[in-house]
Image (cartoon, rainbow, N blue to C red):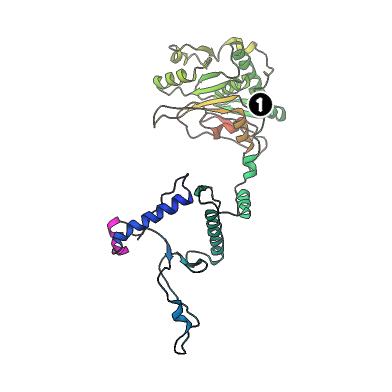
Amino acid sequence: MPVRAHITPTSTTTDLIAQLHGNNNHTYDHQHLALTEIHRITGHDQLFDTLFVFENYPLDSAALAGTDELTITDVRARETNHYPLTLQAMPGPELGLRVEFDTDVFETESVPSLIERLRRVLEAMTADPSARVSSIDVLDPGERDHLDEVGNRAVLASPAPGVSVSELFSAQVIRCPEAVAVTFEGRSLTYRELDETANRLAHLLSDHGVGAGQCVALLLERSTNAVVAMLAVLKTGAAYLAIDPALPDARIAFMLTDATPTAAVTTQALRSRLDAHDVTLIDLADPTIDSQPVEGLPAPAPDDIAYLIYTSGTTGTPKGVAVSHRNLCHLADSTPADLPTGRNAIRMRSTSRCGRSGPHYSAAATWSSCPKTWPVPRQTSAHC
């Protein structure tokens, strides 16, 4: 009779044995049922694929000692079944275990490892029956080391880069200031031009009280100006909240109410979408931007929030996700080493959206704010 074990994270060996013992006793009332009949009743063709057999039939060992000059010196039996794995327990002065397996399913070389793991589990269970089953480690140190190697655990344990996105971008400006950084509809900005333009806007934002721990909404169409605005907010230490103008007013209102931005960067054509909200508006066409310094502001801390992005809300209320400079730089640092490098080596076009949240779409796209590429709106090209 099939017996099901219910193991929770807190189940102990004692709990498991008591449960299996009780469940097994309850099956005796139905032991007359054939397994095929059980399959038919349950509607399942297979209820288990591993067979456990406890050989407890009586055996008169004295009869084997010999009578009338006839002595049985050896007994060998060969059994077979259609289950991939069978474990037999044979009682005696010492409990014996016999494993049979289907060579079409298991490689012969792997079975000793399975037996060794079973031995470790049984030793742990008998050593402390009150210990949780979930705490028993079936792997030996060598196997754990192998998993750490193939899983690259050393990378997971290594500290994330302790810099900000703006620092990485500044380093790229120093490396190739005259290289084209972003192109849109025939207009291009070099890294130097992008950096200086973003610095001017960052100073204006700072004059309006924008800084670390705050948020700035960006209601902009896809353009080079959108990239400038993103970088400018990052340079202030504040987080930017990109808002797609195609979103309905209700969605925009929810994001603004939930994120409570200190200011909003927009254009004359779109500022009316924000008239109903109590937020300082900064127009990208403001002439005072051009009179701001081109020098950069002090770099934000690695743990300052770089940007906010909201889920679509299809399963309920949309939720805001805050991504720090440290996490964003760690993503950039994990860029595949075989990506092409050099001037104009990469031309990126964004082709997907993440919750229609705005000019950039996901953390994966945002890694390009660092030396290799820059996050760009669809139909906007960024160059290394």
Is residue 39 one of those drawn in magenta?
Answer: yes
User: 10 Å neighbourhood of mark 1: few (<14), some, or many (≥20)?
Assistant: many
Amino acid carrying label 1: it is Tyr
Q: Give above or below for 319 relative to 89.
A: above
- Which sits in the foreground, 125 or 102? 125
- Whether residue 339 is visible, yes or no, is no
Among the 4 quarters of the image, the one containing residue 326: top right
- Which sits in the foreground, 318 or 269? 318
Q: Residue 138, how many percent across, how many down?
A: 55, 54
Going 68% across and 16% down the picture, which residue do you hit?
294
Residue at the extreme right: 174
In the image, is 327 to the left or to the right of 93?
right
In the image, is 147 to the left or to the right of 249?
right
Residue at the extreme bottom: 69
The residue singled out by tag 1 in the image is 191
Q: Give above or below for 208 relative to 182.
A: above
Please report the bounds of the magenta region as a residue range: 32-46
Going 35% across and 61% down the picture, which residue do you hit?
1
Q: Residue 8, how many percent across, how many down?
A: 44, 46
Element under label 1? helix
Q: How many marks?
A: 1
- Which sits in the foreground, 227 or 206? 206
- Whether residue 327 is visible, yes or no, is yes
Is residue 353 one of those drawn in magenta?
Answer: no
Quadrant where the C terminus lies? top right
In the image, is 93 to the left or to the right of 173?
left
Going 39% across and 20% down the picture, which residue do you hit?
250
Q: Residue 227, how many percent across, how many down?
A: 57, 24
